[in-house]
Amino acid sequence: QVQLVESGGGSVQAGDSLRLSCAASMGTLANTITGWFRQAPGKEREALAAMVWNTGATFTANSVKGRFTISKDNSKNTLSLQMNSLKPVDTAVYYCAAGSQYGSPWYSTNRYNAWGQGTQVTVAS
């Protein structure tokens, strides 16, 4: 099973940008859907964006549309999330995940069977 490792989190000020990366090993992301989720303390895990690896089709949650962009680097087997105009409400642990390219809706955690360990993003006002 593919293993995922996130990087790029940190502490920033409101209005700043961050770029998260998710490196895959022990397998390929071909024939998967890959996604970004976040979880704030006391809240459920929230889907942010996803990409069908083979086609490049993307999905983005309304809550972050226009600010967050998902992308991939095929040669590096890496998924990225560009986050602009960050707000304090974006503070959370961010996770990347991979799952079957067919199945439950892209925003359902049930669709994903491989998860990274998470990276903390903290946005100060």
Image (cartoon, rainbow, N blue to C red):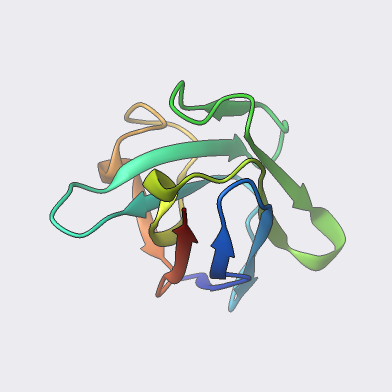
- In the picture as drawn, the residue positioned furthest to the top comes out as 62
Residue at image x 56%, y 46%? 86
Relative height, residue 11 to residue 16 (above, below): below
Q: Where does residue 60 sit, x and y in percent of width and height?
A: 53, 28
Furthest-right residue in view?
75
Picture coordinates of residue 30 (x, y %)?
66, 51
**Nearer-the-camera pick, 16 or 37:** 16
* Point 63% across, 33% down: residue: 67
Drawn side of residue 77 relative to residue 96, left or right:
right
Nearer-the-camera pick, 47 or 68: 68
Q: Position of residue 104 (x, y in %)?
A: 32, 30
Residue 68 falls left or right of residue 45: right
Q: Residue at x 70, y 38 (%)?
A: 54
Q: Is residue 117 above or below residue 58?
A: below
Q: Position of residue 77 (x, y in %)?
A: 73, 63
Q: Quadrant location of residue 89?
A: top left
